[in-house]
Image (cartoon, rainbow, N blue to C red):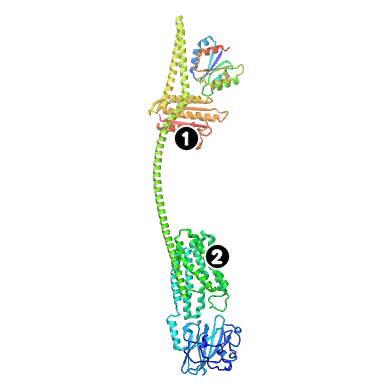
Amino acid sequence: MLSLLIVPGEYVVAQNNLPPIYEIRTDTIPTAYLESRYWQMLPDAKGKWTINDVTRSPLSENFYSRIAPPNNGDTITHTYWFRYRLKSLMNSEAKIAIHAHFEEDSIFVIYPDGRRDQFLTGDFVAWHKKDGLKANNQIPLVLEPAEEIMVYDRGKNHVAGIPENFSVDVASTEKIHQDYVRNTENGGSFFSVPEMENAFLVGVLLIPFFLNLFFFRITKEKEYLYFSLFVILLAITRLLNPVATYWYWRDRSLEPYVGYFNICWILIPFFLVQFIRNFFKTYHDYPRWDKLILTLAILAGLILLTFELMEPSWALSGTKHLVTRQMIFINDIVDALGNLSIALTFAKYRGRKNLFMNLVIIGGLPLMLFWALEISMEGFVRMGIMQNFISQSQYFILEILCIIWFVLLFTLVLLKRFNRLRIENAQQALDKERLAKEKETERALLIEHQKTELAKTVEERTFELKRSLEDLKSTQAQLIQSEKMASLGELTAGIAHEIQNPLNFVNNFSELNKELITEMNHEIESGNFEAVKNIGKDIEENEEKINVHGRRADGIVKSMLQHSRASSGKKEPTDINALCDEYFRLAYHGLRAKDKTFNATMKTEYDPTIGKVNVMAQDIGRVILNLITNAFYSVTEKKRSGKEAYEPTVSISTKKTDDKIEIKVTDNGNGIPQKVLDKIFQPFFTTKPTGQGTGLGLSLSYDIIKSHGGELKVNTREKEFAEFTILLPP
Amino acid sequence: MKILVVDDEKDVRVLFEQRFRREIRNGEMRFAFAFSGEEALQYLEDYDHEAVLILSDINMPGMSGLELLKRIKEKHHEPPPVVMMITAYGDAENYNTAMRLGADDFLTKPVDFSSLKEKLKAIP
């Protein structure tokens, strides 16, 4: 023990149980360690006693020396009172310093004249409250020769415990001051190399922190957030050293809170693993490994949390060791397993050509190796297998280099990644724009194409329409012609019959005349001239008949030809009565020819005063034919519907009034329903079954009468009769 | 023998009277003429059963020859007059209908008078 160097002073038996006086003979040695008999202690379990309490009875009598009771009998508490006596035996002033032995020391110096000085010092005393040499926790004192003082020291610790020894600095004040200046101003221990290294590291770590936070803000990709959190937590743990050192020198009272920085270690592995998982998408590529990594990271964090709860790391290295070596070993195992699983997961990516992966491995490997080395070395040293072969500062520098390397590389990776994302985004935007443009162009083309198509279609349609219009026109013309032909067709059979009859007469009468002539010759020969005369008269009559019937046939053929011919457009004086009769008969026989069961009563009533009227005979004939055909059709339909007492009757009459020629065709057929009455003169309107009527008859008739400056009127009652009246100017 | 000729052509009368002038003169045949089916029926009503032979055209306005045939064969039973149909339309349908309705003969126009004469003379 260094204290052996101290020459023990005169042993004075303590009065009132006071400890013997420690005599100071020199002040050139740095520290004098007081043997335990020179000082007495009094545990203050509640920490509430004052200096006045302990200097007086009864507490004053309770101070005891640590020799008397065995050590393990000491009351373990936070606050203790100590007292010792000092006396200078030097011829000159003795310059000594009392320094703190606890975190907080209240030092009371009582002089022989009863004067009392009070000082406050200690690591946990705020800088501004400290007395004496603050950085050294020393209270300098000057003792006159032979001066004797009594010192009470109230020591207080956060963790209960008693100091092993008790010392007083008795070096000369100059030396003390020199040391102090050297320590504080030359930076001896105030900010030593590790603190500066750590501060530098914190600065370095802040760069990736902000950078990645910025990236996260922009990209919203979680890996940036996790990495920045990981980095900032790492920075905080590194901040512990300089901050703690600063506070150690300036305000140790805040130090417990610095200890909280260690809590960061609970979250660091978690964020690191989260970063790795999100960056490499391990949960996508290797879900099982991913789960393992995450589980181990959480487990490591939980173990550290348990340690913190059991024995807060902010508590100064105390006497209790609740966290056992085995527990620390388990922690190390978990850490090692975590690192191993990450390394193995990375190994899985080996085959994939990934620049990022390579950079990450290059960046992360040194730190991983360093930490692995550190852990194993700690273990080996603890087990006594090997000596620590690198100093603390070398160790720090190595670690810092590794961390900076790691952070730089990772930041580079993230920067590259960010850039790539940016480029990809830009490319995507470009592609999108290009695609949009292409689509636009395509659409424009399509529209153009459609326009052309449409124009073409319109042209085609117009052409088609034109053509169909022309077709329609020609069809209409054809229809008009075919309507004529159709009515002609209706006539044909009738005509045949009508011609047959006169021809029969012609033949018959001519044969008869032949016979009569033969007979007449006989009579001439026999001289019976009276008979000859009679026969001659007969022959003449017959000749007349032949002539009549020949002309009749001739007329029929002529009218047929006329009918089939296009209208000449010439009006000729025409016997309306003859015209009516002719077509009436033609219509009748025409229908008869077509339908053997057809029959109807025909009534005629001609006004002989009409004479000849100036009309286009074949046109008017067609009108009459049409009206009569309709009338016959109507009565036939009615008869077919099966009325017993029904007598189909069609009549035609002519009449001359003051200013009009009137032709009336009447039938007692079904009449015309009111609802179609206004349509009957429209072209193509027909009530006949398809194929039986062209629907042009009445329309043409109407036009023909109009063109004659006449009128075609209809009077009808449904189910009873229909009466068409042609009114012509005379 | 009284013969009723039914035809809407009025010149038929002259024709028949000339053709059969000898028979008429001899008193072998007597002719009556009707110009429509209705007229013919009226004649048969008026001169009950006088005509033993009826020559009828088929195509006539109003009552047709076939209708007339039907009426005659329905009403005038005892003794039924001989009804010969003469028509311009010698088609099968007309022929069949006429035969079904009980026509005794079916002649087509133009009428071959010499054969008609023989047919008439053959009737007892």
- Tell me if residue A711 comes above or below residue A168 in the rendering: above
- Tell me if residue A453 comes above or below residue A132 in the rendering: above
- The number of callouts visible is 2
Separation (CA) of disc 2 from disc 1: 94 Å
For residue B54, what is the image quadrant?
Answer: top right
Residue type at mark 1 is Phe
The subunit carrying tag 2 is A
Q: Neighbour class for label 1 at 10 Å: few (<14), some, many (≥20)?
A: some
Q: Is residue A607 left or right of residue A324?
A: left
Q: Is residue A67 left or right of residue A29?
A: right
Q: Neighbour class for label 2 at 10 Å: few (<14), some, many (≥20)?
A: some
The residue that mark 1 highlights is A685
SS state under label 2: helix
Q: Nearer the viewer, residue A479 or A203?
A: A203
> Which residue does the image show at 50% across and 29% down from the upper left?
A633
Image coordinates for residue A300, horizontal then vertical, percent = 54, 68
Q: Quadrant of the C terminus of chain A?
A: top left
SS state under label 1: loop
Residue situated furthest front in the rendering: A385
> Which residue does the image show at 53% across and 12% down from the upper left?
B117
The residue that mark 2 highlights is A295
Q: Nearer the viewer, residue A390 or A352?
A: A390
Image coordinates for residue B66, horizontal then vertical, percent = 55, 22
Image coordinates for residue A270, horizontal then vertical, percent = 52, 67
Residue type at mark 2 is Thr
| Dot in front, 2 or 1 | 2
The subunit carrying tag 1 is A
One can see residue A657 in this view: no
